[in-house]
Image: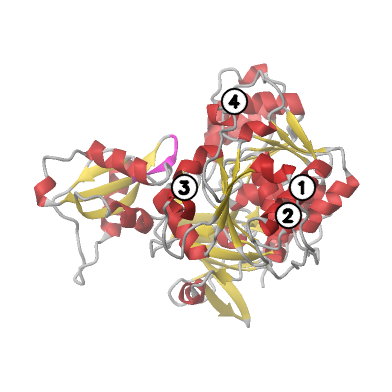
């Protein structure tokens, strides 16, 4: 492999990363032994030490095994906002030798149903505020069939708040614990109080660890199978790349259900013995106050957060002097915002690139030599190339093609979907490379720059939205005859979701665009719900009858660029 990026490799950092031959859980054991009384998590102002974290995860693992019947290899859903319980729940599932299925807390019941049925999960850990979305899938509350939940552990965020706080906290965080009714529902506090001891921990580096879901052109989300080894890779790699250690303090506001937050703001800090300051929901003033109050040194963010943070007229009132690094990805940072960040804090926004299929980063900019609006360079042991997406031949530097990658963080495949797995990989020189579906070019220094997408996807505030999935759900609306979902420019979100709808004849004049918007918001996660709806008499189709989404997308791109209808 040609590797011009090695000339710009971070100083004193080895090119090869030796990974631990252990499960991810072992990191919790090690840090609890090394730093028993040091805070691992600070939830707004409430600390949880490494030893408390380990002990509570063990108790919950015992409850999962002895009361909920979780066995090795079982999948367990984890459905809540960022919180101490999210982290404890994640590691309790691993301690029970089971597999975590992290679920976006914005997902509604209809979306949750797919995760339950596809993963085969019978047990879930759920937050109190999200329980109404989960109960329709619970056997003891009327759900029928084989693909339903039998046991749900219900967590209350306020259980981890010690006394009143002068911070502005969301109402769902401060809400008191509510009584549960019905069999198969278990209060988190009761599960810990029972002090059940788990059986031996038997999971190894090549056992399945976590299965985040990603969508695609088929419409149904697919489970990405990650082992303890692939998950360790980005956890350990991120710590090493940015030179973090046990005295680093990280702000965790990116969602833990997403691989970027999961790897960089949870698993990595636990491995290093770092402290994590956790927020359940983004708030720019609260974030700045927490940075000042707890001496945050590292902040992992998406560009929309940084834009909002710097737009705060009170930003100059906070002492942010201990902040030494801001990093992220998902969408390119606007140049003007990057300049403002540099002028205000003296910091570069260090961008990276990864996927759910790679447990976060494949590429990161070297912190000592970042390039603006750049994916960065391939990190430890990653062989990334640019190929022609049609001929699959490697392209020279400067030419645009599809990124393919071979590395230790790449998933083993899609859960119970051999066809999709086969389509996702190609063989080059006897090794398996993941086809990313992203079009990029590599410059003379070996840095990668995103150019376009081969796959049909919308990037809304850093969240991937797959139009086929949204379209599939919108066809449940009784008035919709046909629909095509595309992306439209948005000043705040970068892109937003737009649906072009053909109504059934009997509903024309009876249903408004806003009615469709409201319905979609009630039936799917807010980030993927169309915010714009346009009615059309018909949709363009190919000779085979397929909707020509690209024609509609190009039309919208022209509108966005010129501000006029072509």
Q: Judging from the image, what secondary structure is the residue with disc 2 in?
A: helix
Task: Describe residue 81's horizontal placement relative to residue 485 as left or right.
Answer: right
Where does label 4 land, which residue?
169
Tag 4 or tag 1, which sits nearer the N-term? 4
Label annotation for residue 135 = 3
Instruction: Please tell me which residue is depicted at 66% across the width and 49% down the height of the picture.
Output: 89
Q: Are marks 1 and 2 in contact (CB under 8 Å)?
A: yes
Q: Tell me the distance, in whole angstroms, between the alpha carbons under discs 2 and 4.
A: 32 Å
Task: Describe residue 219's horizontal placement relative to residue 279 as left or right.
Answer: left
Vertically, is 514 above or below 240? Answer: above
Q: Position of residue 131 (x, y in %)?
A: 50, 42
Where does label 1 land, which residue?
195
- Quick check: can you spot residue 234? yes
Q: Are marks 3 and 4 in contact (CB under 8 Å)?
A: no
Vertically, is 219 above or below 295? Answer: below
Report the span colored magenta: 492-497
């Amino acid at each position: 492999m040609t590797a011009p990026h090695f000339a710009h490799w971070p100083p004193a950092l080895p090119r090869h990363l030796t990974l631990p031959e252990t499960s991810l859980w072992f990191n919790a054991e090690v840090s609890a032994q090394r730093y028993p009384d040091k805070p691992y998590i600070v939830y707004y102002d409430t600390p949880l030490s490494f030893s408390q974290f380990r002990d509570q995860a063990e108790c919950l693992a015992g409850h999962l095994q002895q009361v909920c019947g979780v066995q090795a290899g079982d999948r367990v859903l984890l459905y809540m906002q960022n919180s101490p319980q999210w982290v404890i729940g994640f590691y309790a599932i691993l301690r029970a030798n089971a597999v975590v299925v992290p679920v976006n807390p914005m997902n509604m019941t209809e979306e949750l149903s797919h995760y339950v049925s596809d993963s085969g999960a019978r047990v879930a850990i759920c937050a109190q505020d999200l329980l109404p979305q989960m109960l329709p899938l619970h056997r003891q509350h009327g759900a029928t069939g084989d693909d339903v939940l039998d046991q749900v552990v219900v967590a209350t965020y306020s259980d981890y708040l010690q006394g009143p706080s002068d911070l502005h906290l969301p109402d769902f965080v401060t809400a008191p614990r509510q009584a549960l009714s019905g069999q198969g529902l278990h209060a988190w506090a009761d599960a810990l109080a029972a002090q059940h001891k788990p059986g031996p921990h038997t999971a190894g580096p090549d056992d399945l660890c976590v299965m985040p879901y990603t969508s695609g052109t088929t419409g149904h989300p697919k489970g990405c199978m990650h082992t303890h080894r692939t998950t360790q890779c980005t956890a350990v790699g991120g710590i090493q790349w940015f030179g973090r250690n046990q005295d680093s303090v990280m702000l965790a506001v990116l969602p833990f259900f997403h691989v970027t937050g999961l790897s960089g703001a949870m698993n990595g800090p636990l491995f290093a013995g770092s402290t994590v300051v956790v927020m359940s929901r983004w708030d720019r003033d609260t974030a700045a106050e927490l940075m000042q109050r707890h001496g945050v040194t590292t902040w992992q963010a998406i560009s929309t957060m940084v834009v909002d943070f710097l737009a705060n007229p009170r930003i100059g009132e906070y002492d942010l002097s201990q902040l030494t690094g801001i990093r992220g990805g998902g969408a390119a940072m606007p140049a003007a915002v990057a300049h403002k960040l540099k002028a205000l804090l003296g910091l570069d926004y260090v961008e990276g690139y990864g996927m759910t299929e790679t447990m976060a980063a494949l590429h990161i900019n070297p912190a000592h030599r970042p390039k603006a609006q750049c994916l960065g360079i391939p990190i430890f042991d990653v062989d990334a190339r640019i190929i022609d997406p049609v001929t699959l031949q490697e392209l020279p530097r400067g030419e645009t093609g599809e990124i393919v990658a071979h590395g230790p963080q790449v998933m083993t495949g899609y859960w119970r979907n051999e066809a999709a797995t086969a389509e996702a990989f190609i063989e080059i020189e006897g090794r398996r490379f993941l086809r990313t579906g992203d079009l990029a070019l590599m410059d003379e220094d070996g840095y990668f720059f995103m150019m376009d997408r081969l796959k049909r996807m919308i990037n809304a505030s850093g969240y991937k939205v797959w139009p086929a999935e949204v379209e599939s759900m919108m066809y449940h609306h009784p008035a919709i005859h046909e629909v095509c979902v595309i992306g439209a420019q948005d000043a705040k979100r970068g892109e937003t979701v737009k649906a072009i709808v053909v109504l059934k004849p009997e509903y024309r004049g009876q249903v408004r665009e806003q009615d469709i918007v409201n319905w979609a918001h009630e039936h799917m996660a807010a980030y993927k719900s169309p915010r714009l709806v346009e009615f059309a008499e018909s949709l363009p189709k190919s000779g085979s009858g397929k909707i020509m989404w690209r024609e509609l997308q190009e039309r919208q791109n022209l509108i966005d660029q010129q501000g006029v209808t072509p």
